[in-house]
């Protein structure tokens, strides 16, 4: 009888340790908060029905959170010197959606689901709502305890060279293929004319970026006229701005990229080869799958610098440390 008691206690302890100190895994909340993923999905769906651009907003939020301190929810913190106010995070939004999901989760299972995991799940649901690939997200992240505006200086910028972009991704453990695929997240969403001014009107020697297809340049200039409203927005994917697909890569190949950083992907032999691999004659049959490769890259990104086990905390609200 004593032996049975010891075994039971050991099993309970092991189960608890698996929850407290385990690494990321699919179904992390299945026993401690069974409705966690359902609640997040419901909140994201409601926000998407009000504004279908919310999918791109939440996907971008996940990228910006992960790229700085790792996927730790540090971008969610409010405060004068908090990370969200960095220049590299301009236009990042979706904080209210994450906070709504957190509020509902706290009523059901307080102190269990991290804000960092909510961000990752919301990105997954956003891709699915945009007719993109469905995938399972690994959970078990804990929230970070640091959020500093200076940390975001490492964010990739739209006007950087391909070598700078590759370097920043490689420093995070992300490959050239990850750079291409994660940039392809621009298949949904919009950008501001603010980020187009130099490419359209101040490009060295030529005035406009010569990599822009001549048939596309007049359209871009009409949407973002010189001395026009820099806050006016235009789709980043010419052709299917509301559908998550590989059209963005075809645009880059054909000179219809909107962002300068996207266009630069075709200037480099390695990244150009990756883009072309999705459009070869036999690609539909024996070539790589854009959807499967994107899932691999975003899951890989979602593991960057995570806090697990006893690291970090589980915030009560996402905008403030406990």
Image (cartoon, rainbow, N blue to C red):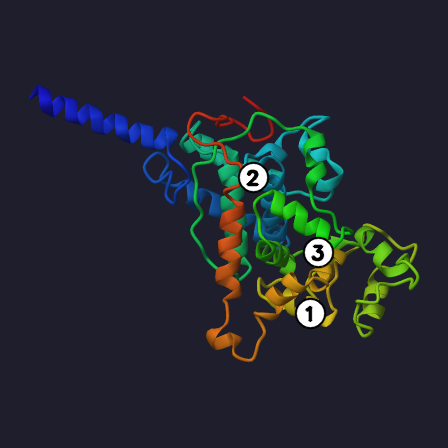
> Residue at the spot x=66%, y=42% of the render?
93
Classify mark 2: helix, strand or loop: helix
Q: Earlier in the sequence, mark 1 or mark 3?
A: 3
Please provide percent x and percent y for residue 17.
32, 28
Q: Is residue 51 above or below residue 143?
A: below
Name the residue that disc number 3 marks.
190
> Residue at the spot x=16%, y=26% of the render?
7
Name the residue that disc number 1 marks.
253
Q: Nearer the viewer, mark 1 or mark 3?
A: 1
Please provide percent x and percent y for residue 289.
50, 66
Please provide percent x and percent y for residue 11.
22, 29
How far is disc 1 from disc 3 in space, using C-alphas? 19 Å
Classify mark 1: helix, strand or loop: helix
Q: Earlier in the sequence, mark 1 or mark 2?
A: 2
Please provide percent x and percent y for residue 315.
51, 27
How far is disc 3 from disc 2 in space, using C-alphas? 20 Å
Query: Residue 98 got which mark?
Result: 2
- On screen, residue 268 versus residue 59, left or right, reads right
Question: Which image quadrant for residue 37?
Answer: top left
Residue 43 visible within the image: no
Q: Residues within 10 Å of mark 1 (few under 14, many from 20)?
A: many
> Residue at the spot x=37%, y=43% of the render?
27
- On screen, residue 249 versus residue 103, left or right, reads right
Q: Is residue 191 above or below residue 82?
A: below
> Residue at the spot x=61%, y=38% of the render?
96
Residue 72 visible within the image: yes
- On screen, residue 156 versus residue 134, left or right, reads right
């Amino acid at each position: 009888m004593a032996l049975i008691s010891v075994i039971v206690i050991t099993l309970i302890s092991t189960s608890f340790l698996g929850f407290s100190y385990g690494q990321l895994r699919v179904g992390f909340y299945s026993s401690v908060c069974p409705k966690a993923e359902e609640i997040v999905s419901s909140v994201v769906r409601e926000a998407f029905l009000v504004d279908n651009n919310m999918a791109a907003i939440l996907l971008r939020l996940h990228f910006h959170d992960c790229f700085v301190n790792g996927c730790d929810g540090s971008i969610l913190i409010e405060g004068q010197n908090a990370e969200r106010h960095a220049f590299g995070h301009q236009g990042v939004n979706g904080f209210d959606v994450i906070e709504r999901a957190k509020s509902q989760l706290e009523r059901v299972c307080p102190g269990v689901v991290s804000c960092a995991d909510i961000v990752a799940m919301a990105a997954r649901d956003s891709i699915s709502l945009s007719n993109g690939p469905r995938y399972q997200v690994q959970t078990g992240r804990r929230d970070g305890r640091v959020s500093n505006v200076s940390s975001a200086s490492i964010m990739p910028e739209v006007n950087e060279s391909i070598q700078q972009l590759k370097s920043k991704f490689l420093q995070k453990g992300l490959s050239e293929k990850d750079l291409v695929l994660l940039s392809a997240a621009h298949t949904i969403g919009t950008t501001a004319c603010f980020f187009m001014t130099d490419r359209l009107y101040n490009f060295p020697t030529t005035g406009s970026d010569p990599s822009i297809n001549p048939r596309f340049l007049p359209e871009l200039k009409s949407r973002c006229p010189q001395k026009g409203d820099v806050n006016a927005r235009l789709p980043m994917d010419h052709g299917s701005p509301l559908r998550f697909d590989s059209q963005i890569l075809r645009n880059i190949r054909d000179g219809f990229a909107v962002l300068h950083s996207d266009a630069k992907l075709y200037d480099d032999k390695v990244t150009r080869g990756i883009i072309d691999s999705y459009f070869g004659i036999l690609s539909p049959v024996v070539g790589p799958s854009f959807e499967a490769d994107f899932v691999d890259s975003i899951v890989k990104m979602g593991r960057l610098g995570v806090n697990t086990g006893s690291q970090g905390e589980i915030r009560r609200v996402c905008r403030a440390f406990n």
